[in-house]
Image: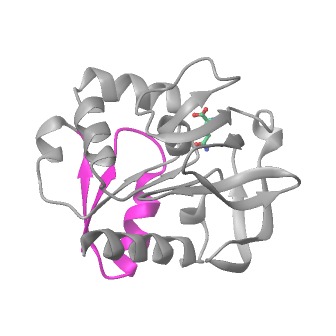
Amino acid sequence: MRIAILALQGAFIEHELMMRGLGCDVFEIRKLSDWNQPKDGLIIPGGESTVQSKLLNELGLSVPIRNAIISGLPVMGTCAGLILLAEQVENGNSSMGLSTMSIEVCRNAYGRQLGSFYVKSSMKDVGEDLPMVFIRAPYIKRVYGNARVMAERDGRIVAARQENQLVTSFHPELTEDNRVHRYFLDMVREYGE
Ligand code: GLN
């Protein structure tokens, strides 16, 4: 399987290592010509969603990526990646760019650095005791349409899925536990059939 990793900014290297460890080919998306390579899935990493959103637009990547996701390309968005995929950011005012997923997101919901923390919690269809690293994390205020809650922590939604799209407000790539990535690869297989 060949996985594209958006590598404009943020924690993309850790996703690459995780995917290589699971036997995938990976390649980085840094410009429009990278995007044209064949791929079975896409990862949008954590980082700073405002910066990633600006670069996606400037590089002409927003529209082709959005169209591919709408056409069924499996995508996993972590943290800032989740924000980019949300149709509604902060009180339903606007989206940050890709706007493919029926979720409403609050950015920096846990405050600044002080709000970074680690917990173990469960995620539907993935398992129990999953390590979750939150770094200035967003949370999902609500899901609607075809989006489904996959994990909640302290009454807040921290992971969701909508068909070919999977998002987490935490960073599974910053742990030794590869179950979320394995779950995503199952989605990639399902959509590749
Ligand atoms: N707070 C960041 C944003 O709004 C996301 C943080 C992260 O990806 N770790 O983009």
Relative depth, front residue between 52 and 156: 156
Relative depth, front residue between 32 and 101: 101
Relative depth, front residue between 132 and 157: 157
Above or below: residue 154 compared with residue 30: below
Looking at the rendering, which quadrant does residue 100 occupy? top left
In the picture, the quarter occupied by the N terminus is bottom left
User: Residue 50: image x %, image y %?
Assistant: 50, 25
> Does residue 23 show up magenta in the picture?
yes
User: Residue 33: image x %, image y %?
Assistant: 11, 40
Residue 137 visible in the snapshot: no
Q: Which residues are magenta?
A: 1-30
Which residue shows up at 34% across the image and 46% down it? Answer: 7
Above or below: residue 166 compared with residue 19: above
> Does residue 67 show up magenta in the picture?
no
Looking at the rendering, which quadrant does residue 18 occupy? bottom left
Residue 113 visible in the snapshot: yes
Q: Is residue 181 left or right of residue 28?
A: right
Which residue shows up at 59% across the image and 64% down it? Answer: 172
Which residue shows up at 24% across the image and 64% down it? Answer: 40
In the picture, the quarter occupied by the C terminus is bottom left
Q: Residue furthest front?
A: 145
Quadrant of the picture in which ligand 1 is shown: top right
User: Residue 110: image x %, image y %?
Assistant: 80, 39
Which residue shows up at 25% across the image and 71% down it? Answer: 192
Q: Is residue 159 left or right of residue 11?
A: right
Q: How many marks?
A: 0
User: Residue 162: image x %, image y %?
Assistant: 51, 54
